[in-house]
Amino acid sequence: MRSDVIQTLLVANRGEIACRIFRTCRDLGITTVAVYSDADDGALHVREADLAVRLPGAAPADTYLRGDLVVAAALAAGADAVHPGYGFLSENAAFAAAVQDAGLVWVGPPVKAIELMASKTRAKELMAGAGVPLLAPVDPATAGEDDLPLLLKAAAGGGGRGMRIVRERGALPGELLAAAAEAASAFGDGEVFAEPYVERGRHVEVQVMADEHDTVWALGTRDCSLQRRHQKVIEEAPAPGLDEALRTRLHDAATAAARAVGYRGAGTVEFLVSADGRPYFLEMNTRLQVEHPVTEAVFGLDLVALQLRVAEGGPLEATPPSPSGHAVEARLYAEDPARDWQPQTGALLALEVPDAPGLRLDTGYTGGDTIGVHYDPMLAKVIAHAPTRAGAVRLLARALELARIHGPVTNRELLVRSLRHPDFAAARLDTGFYDRHLAALTAPAAGRDPAHAALAAALATAVRTTTSGGPAPTRFGAWRNVASGPQVKRYRSEPDGAEHEVAYRTPRTGLPEPHDAPGVRVLAVTPDRVTLEVGGVARHFTVTADGDGDRVYVDADAASYTFTALPRFTDPATDTAPGSLLAPMPGTVVRLAEGLATGVPVEAGQPLIWLEAMKMEHRILAPASGTLTALHAAPGHQVEVGALLAVVQEDPAAIPVPEETA
């Protein structure tokens, strides 16, 4: 029996997955090697590795996607094995072959299996021969109204790149071009195929693990239906609400898929389950999945350790352990769901999740790190495991609610509200969840209390600015401006931009008194904690200011707030000219609307400019109908947040005239 004992492992990846693999390596006594780009100099995965090798450059194409540089790094560091993680080169057959050609152990499936599953179109043909249920493909050239809606997908990759839903026949040619362009940009292959789009379908997958001794495990099911832009947000195991017959059919199909390609190691077979319970094969991911922790929690396994065992030639047990309980995972992203999921960048001042039985945090960041523009905006995964689904969901929602996350805007509140949504609680799951509920989930929440949080920020800031490191005073006469008049502070809350003005009086002795706030009483104030009695209930607010004090973070029992201090009076010079299109985030201009140039007419809502940032494309729309009077963007340009991209001069004729003056 082959035996390649791994002593030193290089992880050809970054961030959370690299840190997660290193954790298992430490438990097994394996020396770890990181690779890093210039943008990741000092990143958490670099700090946690025993050795690290620089890949010069910042863009993925120059660093983490350069298989030749990664192999050279492994040899230079004395590694004897390479683990690809997920993303980047993890499903690249040429890279896997190069690793093995260099005499290194490849911690992944056979090269042939990767090749067979690399193209979704070829994979579907192979699965049909293995008896795996499939959706019938549709030829876009001959598609008619009866074939709609259609789903366009990139043949060479996933993650939502190159994916489009087409509901109108006239939109098909344009969407095909857009999907092919995005696929070519993301995967170097513009092949796109079409299949029927299943309304209200569920995304259900089966984790498989196989060794070279003809053992194949089907490790239960996962539901990954809650997705934004065809990328998963919340995942759970086992998939709820499936009858035993359907579970058996999914397990059998996944096992058949693995055997059909001679699979080894960890992989995932993904299915779309229709509303009437019929499963259809989507694809096989020949790597570890982001959501693998929920399967680990339910089965009590370490899938990375099993990957290493299989790569060393070791056998799996004849049968896997029995599952226990339920696990749910939430992906914490630096993004603004209310603004078209725009990714966010900047300094991450704090990232702290409660430590409790059943909770797990997988992350590639800690407080003090910086979130850049080059990579996926996922900050962390929070996983909860409990005996029941309801218990796991409750534990996860509360952990996210109590987490301290200071810095760029995140999707934390969306995650909490999603987990507590009646449809999620009742396991009414499908991939259209956010299409139906996003507006309600991002609307101001009834339980939020920004006015009282802003008051807490003002009181704590006032104490902080008048102390010199000693104990906080309980008397406020020293920092009052005018004994008879209230002090006023103004804040803008993020990310909604709402302004809050708070006023309080500072008597010569005792605690301050809120001005014009009936039912509110100050119970205690320190530079970092304020207790207010609101309607007879004592509420605690933890207050943290950034280095210059302009931004203040307030964490309450059931909500968190970010405030930016504003001057007493606004500066009119900061206004932006009407019709200006500003970059909502740092990124790269990837393309312009066809024929876009100064002087051309545009329609309100028309996509004009496409930006790529953090592995996603973002459309910049015309704010009104009119004429493009300035264009400062061009494909390939790197732009910073707030950069002026273009200006649209509104057509007066397009402005509705009130009826009473018509």
Image (spheres, rainbow, N blue to C red):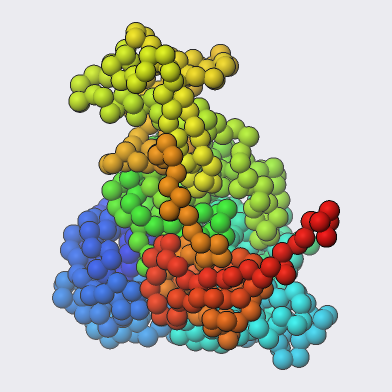
Q: Is 254 placed above or below 339 here?
A: below
Q: Is 299 placed above or below 162 here?
A: above
Q: Where is residue 193 shown, x and y percent of the image? A: 63, 84
Q: In the rendered image, is residue 434 in sight?
A: yes
Residue at (48% x, 45% y) in the render: 494
Picture quarter with the N terminus: bottom left
Number of marks drawn: 0
Residue at (43% x, 53% y) in the render: 574
Q: Nearer the viewer, residue 510 or 182?
A: 510
Q: Where is residue 59 shown, x and y percent of the image? A: 33, 74
Residue 86 figure quarter: bottom left
Q: Nearer the viewer, residue 393 or 641?
A: 641
Residue at (33% x, 68% y) in the render: 13
Residue 389 figure quarter: top right
Residue that protrudes farthest toward the top in the picture: 509
Residue at (77% x, 60% y) in the render: 657
In the figure, is residue 657 to the left or right of 435?
A: right
Q: In the rendered image, is residue 104 in sight?
A: no
Residue 36 figure quarter: bottom left
In the figure, is residue 375 to the left or right of 205?
A: left
Picture quarter with the C terminus: bottom right
Residue that protrudes farthest toward the bottom in the picture: 141
Q: Where is residue 346 shown, x and y percent of the image? A: 35, 55
In the figure, is residue 179 to the left or right of 33?
A: right
Q: Is 474 placed above or below 458 here?
A: above
Q: Where is residue 178 shown, x and y percent of the image? A: 59, 81
In the figure, is residue 300 to the left or right of 9?
A: right
